[in-house]
Image (cartoon, rainbow, N blue to C red):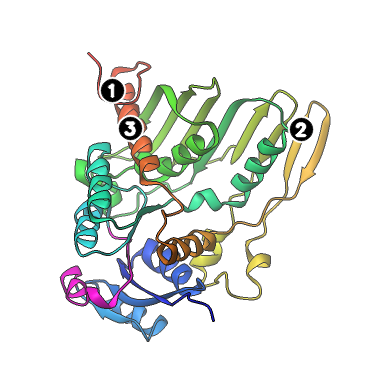
Amino acid sequence: MSDVRELKVGLIGFGLAGSSFHAPLIDAASTLTLAAIVTSNPERAAQAKQQYPDARIHASPDELWQNASALDLIVIASPNSSHKPLAMAAMKAGLPVVVDKPLCASAEDGRELIAESKRSGVMLSVFQNRRWDGDFLTLQRLITSGELGEIRRFESRFERWRPEPKPGWRQSGGTEDAGGVLYDLGAHLIDQALVLFGPVEHVYAELDQRYPNAEVDDDSFIALTHRNGVRSQLWMSSVAAHSGPRIRALGSKAAFVSHSLDGQEAALRSGNRPDKPDWLKAIKGEDGVQVAGDDKQPVALESGAYIDFYEAIGAAIQKGTTGPVDPADAVAGLEIVAAAKRSSELGQVVSPGPSRN
């Protein structure tokens, strides 16, 4: 007999992140069940009830906390400004918690959350789903195998063409809102660079506001110099009428280039799920290419697997181990976000960490 039990999950937030990413992945994971959903929006509440009829629908987190003893995990997919207080409340209730990226608005707040996790003895992890993108998994494999040689430069982009800004909190300039593409798309790009190449010594950034009356950055670039000498160049934009390669990694033996965006987001937003029989077909994109001068070889991309994050979360709770994404990694990313802001303001290269006089 297996001692693995079904874990009941409470999901806070049913906007894009909650409804299209977290809810279907939680529901598809083998050891998790979506037991409760929090949303104050009546239309979203009706949608949640239709899609997940066995889940209890709550209008506020306070209602959820009243039934906290019936839950095994809290997932926070609400606006960024609420991440820290909700994560604190979950951990003080003795519940493991997953927070959508970014973990919070600042590295200092992130360290406070880590301290509470250690104090309360409950797991804290961050939904850095882009670690399970197919192109990223492929690049990791090529680096590990040595096929590219020593990586010298890493270029990575998340660029969109959205001539008119979408309304909502992501366009707000409040510090606590953590809005703009640096926090949104940049959180993924920075995390991937750190996973691949480790700590950063220097940061240079250009954070621009292209929308009329913009309060936050919508078209930005960050250059990172890692301690091991690798240079990462990261582009994030909502106003790019043409996108460059999704990934270009230049090594001493060869380069790897991928143009297509991982198909999991589009599949999830269309209603597909990783437990459906046509999932792998739905997410398959174009091949990448390994290049050395005139020699070009197609590289079939690994299948992306966001579901692996939640399978690992379930296993961690069952075994009492740490989650698949260390929150300290998120704090390191937030240090780079802060450094990027300083760099852009000063027009200088800066070092991550506390501001230096």
Q: Which residues are magenta?
A: 60-78
Q: Which residue is at the front of the view, 289 or 85?
A: 85
Mark carried by residue 345: 1
Mark with earlier residue (2, 3): 2
Position of the N terminus, as image quadrant, is: bottom right
Q: Residue at x 63, y 32 (%)?
A: 249
Residue lying at the far right of the rendered structure: 295
Corner quadrant of residue 10: bottom left
Which amino acid does the dot numbered 1 rest on? Answer: Glu
Find numbered disc 2 in the image and state the secondary structure of the residue it sits on.
strand
Mark carried by residue 331: none
Q: Residue at x 39, y 25 (%)?
A: 205
Q: Residues within 10 Å of mark 3 (few under 14, many from 20)?
A: some
Measure how far apart labels 2 and 1 are at the Cα level: 38 Å
| Residue that label 2 marks | 291
Instruction: For the residues labelled 2 and 3, say whether their Cβ atoms are less than 8 Å apart.
Output: no
Corner quadrant of residue 238: top left
Which amino acid does the dot numbered 2 rest on? Answer: Val
**Residue 45 placement (x, y as % from top left):** 29, 78
| Residue that label 3 marks | 335
**Residue 177 placement (x, y as % from top left):** 23, 47
Q: Residue at x 50, y 40 (%)?
A: 192
Q: Residues within 10 Å of mark 1 (few under 14, many from 20)?
A: few
Q: Left or right of 131: which side holds 32?
A: left
Q: Single out the mark in the foreground, 1 or 3.
A: 3
